[in-house]
Image (cartoon, coloured by chain):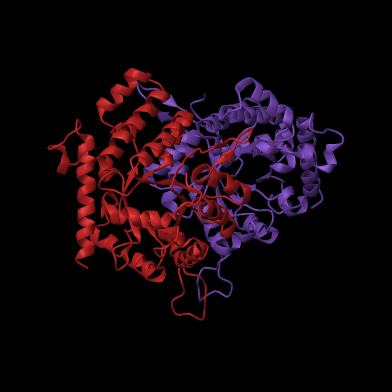
Chain colours: A red, B purple
Amino acid sequence: MSNEPTNFADRLIAAARAKESCVMVGLDPRLKQIPTHVQDSARKRVGSTVEGVARCILEFNRRIIDAVADFSVAVKPQIAFYEPYGAAGIQAFSETIQHAREAGLLVIADAKRNDIGSTAEAYAAAYLGTTPLWDGAEFSAFAADALTVNAYLGSDGVRPFVETAKANGKGLFVLVKTSNKSSGELQDLRVHDTRRQSPEAIFERLGGMVKQWGAELVGEGGYSSVGAVVGATFPEQAKALREMLPGVPFLVPGYGAQGATAADVAWCFDAAGLGAIVNSSRGIIFAYEQDAYAERYGEAKFAEAAAAAAKQMRDEINEALASR
Amino acid sequence: MSNEPTNFADRLIAAARAKESCVMVGLDPRLKQIPTHVQDSARKRVGSTVEGVARCILEFNRRIIDAVADFSVAVKPQIAFYEPYGAAGIQAFSETIQHAREAGLLVIADAKRNDIGSTAEAYAAAYLGTTPLWDGAEFSAFAADALTVNAYLGSDGVRPFVETAKANGKGLFVLVKTSNKSSGELQDLRVHDTRRQSPEAIFERLGGMVKQWGAELVGEGGYSSVGAVVGATFPEQAKALREMLPGVPFLVPGYGAQGATAADVAWCFDAAGLGAIVNSSRGIIFAYEQDAYAERYGEAKFAEAAAAAAKQMRDEINEALASR
């Protein structure tokens, strides 16, 4: 490893330019939807155990990663789908990250971690750094390039992550305006201010804090390694945030299965077509189940179906960006 | 297991009455502070590896759990201190929970998890339920009694946890007003309302939502299994929340090392001295390092020091409650 790690935001821009893609593939491996032959193979070799299920998930992920690597810049393993399998699941999560990095993909660990002080430092070390063992040895649990973080605790809950990211050339994406229906219950509340006709929303206040937190991590490309999660399902808010936060990269969920279109996500990009990575999970990894891909590929060619879906998503978004 | 699980809040009240204690011991096993002889023993038997460190942590926890079981109602393992050791750390986390339950303690998994839909369901299954494997088998990754949850995503991000808790007699503690210095940056912002002289704060709005989320999980003792995290370091806010949220149990961090006193935490209890569990982590598990315990117990008797510290905390809070 180099002693001077490249800035994460710069690595993201370089990958987006090289691949002409902003696609991120969400690795949410729901066991029931993994093709039968992948399940049977793991069960036969490892056993009908939790270790067998974890191996099945890892092998599914490896096939998906290899298939989508040409059309996507990053993968986003969602740790919630690995924790239910305990230590075996966490091992599969760790090895999935390794495989994705070996395939030349950036890895955003979607864990939405949050805590304060030395507790947050421990999380940051797990995902973005290393942890001392004995005799001077250091252990890297999950060698991700970036981590999603929930900032309800305020600056105390974010700075330890920022420090670790800064030290190691890694990145963060802080939840700002999420893609789910009820996200407005807290995020859209307006901050009391009798002097203003239209006071700022909580998500706008938080967006401003994200910009501050990332001020020392701005790379040569003008973007910071401290980004924001901004759902494409609320295009008006996304547009407002993009204008408000130049230089803050957006991680954009909500495309495809959650209903956002290529035109919706286009608001999250800057004039040069940079500044955002767009996630699709089910829509890509389980594309083989969709009408559009089922006949041509089917279960046997699930990885090819994922590749085709990733390529199509890349092209659709690139077209939407070109026609703005 | 019984087919009709007892309500978590009722189990909490029963434990508090039986032990005349509201003490919760935070299991934050920082390796550097674990006594040398415990480290040496694990290193010798397991090896100077990540598995050796994980075993060291588990053995430290077991000793602490056995020592404090008479004086405390619950333990709160903080998963951030286990994740840096990857799969081995997660195995130690899981076995720590098992050991605490066998010792008759309730277990609050402090993971501050947050996500939506089927992702939140997967987290809930990991901590508060079971996950299907193959051939009808079900796997329980972390058999906790309750889980801490961050609600920035709104109702979509909490209901899946509530449903799993309800189905399994488990509980939740939603972050409402946290104990850290910067908690006010978002939590204390007031919601815009020109009709009110003193509009409600975000944490009050969220408190009201917590009450609603838990309405169907109220036990025979009048408390809900959906509780709130309310830091004792802000006694005025804690007092306001206690008045506003009868029937919502509080998980109270901030005692001891973070600066809150027994008088501060007393505001979190109802008139009967129920309705709150108070956490101390470092102040108990590493009591052997403190002046008050170092001479009498020292490193060799670290577990006895933890027991003495837990007993003293129990007595101090009981006295503060009795003298109100």
Residue B109 falls in image quadrant: top right
Q: Is residue A324 left or right of residue B125?
A: left
User: Measured along the vertical axis of the image, is residue B260 above or below residue B39?
Assistant: below
* Residue at the extreme left of the image, as rendered: A295
Question: Looking at the picture, how far across and down is residue B6, in whole percent?
Answer: 55, 32
Q: Is residue B23 left or right of residue A261?
A: right
User: Measured along the vertical axis of the image, is residue B240 above or below residue B229?
Assistant: below
The structure residue drawn at horizontal position 26% and vertical position 44%, both measured from the top left corner, is: A284
Question: Looking at the picture, how far across and down is residue B269, in whole percent?
Answer: 69, 49
The structure residue drawn at horizontal position 54% and vertical position 52%, both measured from the top left corner, is: A167
Q: Is residue A243 left or right of residue B31?
A: left
Q: How many marks?
A: 0
Residue A43 falls in image quadrant: top left
* Residue at the extreme right of the image, as rendered: B295
From where the camera sits, is residue A177 visible?
A: no
The structure residue drawn at horizontal position 35% and vertical position 64%, both measured from the top left corner, is: A238
- Depth check: give the residue in front, A313 or B262: A313
- Depth check: give the residue in front, A169 or A294: A169
From where the camera sits, is residue B302 visible?
A: yes
Question: Looking at the picture, how far across and down is residue A319, in whole percent?
Answer: 19, 60
Question: Looking at the picture, how far across and down is residue A3, in whole percent?
Answer: 51, 49
- Depth check: give the residue in front, B51 or A70: A70
